[in-house]
Amino acid sequence: MDSALLLNLIQTNKIKDQSELLNLIRREGHDITQSTLSRQLKRLGITKVDGFYKRNPIKSRGTSPILDIISSPPNLLLIKTLPGNAGAVAFSLEQHDFTEIAGTIAGDDTIMVAVKDPSSLEILKEKIEVSFEY
C-alpha cells in the first residue's frame, strides 16, 4: 500500500480508529496488518486530533530517508526516498549484507532493486524496513 492512498483516506474521511481505517484500505484492494498500518501512520506523522486521524506536518518526515517500499513481483522492489537521497540509500543497500539483491538503479528519489530469487522479495522488503527503521 502506498502512502498516497493512506494520506488520501485520512484527508477525505473522518476516521476515528484503526479498524475503520483498515476497512477502508481493504475496500481499496489492499490487505495489510494492523501493525503495518501503525508503522505507516507513525512514519507519516498521522495522529488523532480531536478524535479523528489527521496528518501532523511537523512529525511527518521521521528519521528514515525511505518514504515507501513497493513490491513489484516477481523480482522488483521500488523504493521512494526523500528528494536527492536515492543514490545514498542505494549505495547503503549494496553495502549491507543483503544477499537477495542482484543490483540497484537509483534516480533522484526512486530506487529499483532487482532481487535474485522471486521467493525472497518480501523477505528483502522486511529486511530493508528493519534496517532503515522505515
Image: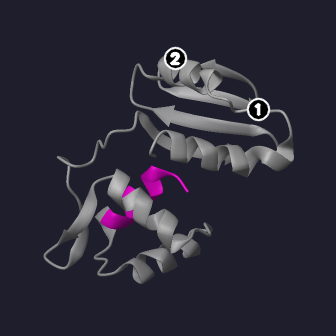
Identify the residue position indicated by label 1 in the image: 99
Identify the residue position indicated by label 2 in the image: 87
Q: Tell me which residue sits at (57%, 18%) in the image.
A: 91
- Which amino acid is tagged 2? Gly
In screen coordinates, is 115 left or right of 21?
A: right
- Front-most of 41 and 13? 41
Q: Tell me which residue sits at (44%, 82%) in the image.
A: 19
In screen coordinates, is 52 left or right of 30?
A: left
Q: How many labels does the image show?
A: 2
**Residue 95 magenta-highlighted:** no
Q: Where is residue 75 in the image (x, y as percent from the top left)?
A: 80, 39
Please determine whether, in this image, residue 26 is positioned above or below residue 84: below
Does dot 2 land on a helix, a strand or a loop?
helix
Examine the image and state in which quarter residue 76 appears: top right
Which span is picked out in magenta? 1-10
In screen coordinates, is 73 left or right of 57?
A: right
Residue 73 in sight: no
